[in-house]
Amino acid sequence: MSRFFLMLGLGLTVVGCGDGGGVQDPVAVYEAVLERELGEPGNAAEAYLFIDGKAPPQETLDRLRERWPKLRAGSESLRGREHRVSLGELRWVGRNRAEVRGGFSNGMDGRSSLYHVVRKNGQWVVENVEVKAIS
């Protein structure tokens, strides 16, 4: 009998229990960074998004467009003076913590940063930004 409870305890430890507060949702992390950089959802200028160097999957883009309707796939970019957003190298640092690299450019000037994103009260938010390069 004690063996059963030991196995049950190990199973709960591996699987986890509770409300799923530590679910790793990459798109939610990207949303936090975009909110920080593009501003208030719905009011942002048109921007072209790249994730890991390419256009995001359509379902990711659709989800992000719910908040930023003017967001476009990076593959639609004409490479002119337009806002470009590049996100990548997402790294989970814990259940409620992630780091993601981001680059933002207006076609002339740009910036590369490392975003420290945390989950607080069920929402992913940018806690700190380390600017790595400015051009």
Image (spheres, helix red, strand yellow):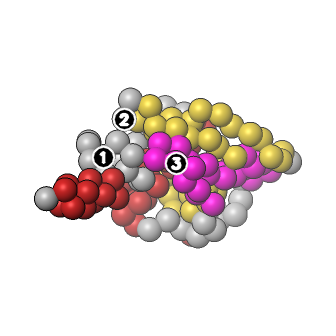
Mark 2–mark 3 Cα distance, whole angstroms, equals: 15 Å
Residue at the (57%, 62%) spot, across then down? 51
Mark with earlier residue (1, 3): 1
User: Residue 24: image x %, image y %?
Assistant: 42, 53
Mark with earlier residue (2, 1): 1
Mark with earlier residue (2, 3): 3
Q: Name the amino acid type tagged 1.
A: Gly
**Secondary structure under the numbered disc 1 in the rendered image:** loop
Q: Name the amino acid type tagged 3.
A: Gly
Residue 32 is inside the magenta segment: no
Residue 109 is inside the magenta segment: yes
Q: Is residue 76 visible?
A: no
Q: Is residue 103 left or right of residue 14?
A: right
Mark 3 packing: few (<14 Cα in 10 Å), some, or many (20+)? Answer: few
Q: Quadrant of residue 60?
A: bottom left
Mark 1–mark 3 Cα distance, whole angstroms, equals: 14 Å
> Which segment is the magenta one?
89-113
Q: Is residue 13 left or right of residue 55?
A: left
Residue at the (52%, 38%) spot, across then down? 118
Q: Which residue is mark 3?
A: 94
Q: Is residue 117 left or right of residue 95?
A: right
Residue at the (26%, 42%) spot, across then down? 19
User: Residue 14: image x %, image y %?
Assistant: 34, 58
In the rendered image of this protein, does residue 18 appear above or below residue 4? above
Residue 49's tag is none
Residue at the (57%, 50%) spot, across then down? 93
Which numbered disc, 2 or 3, marks the residue closer to the eye?
Answer: 3
Residue 20's tag is 1
**Secondary structure under the numbered disc 2 in the rendered image:** loop
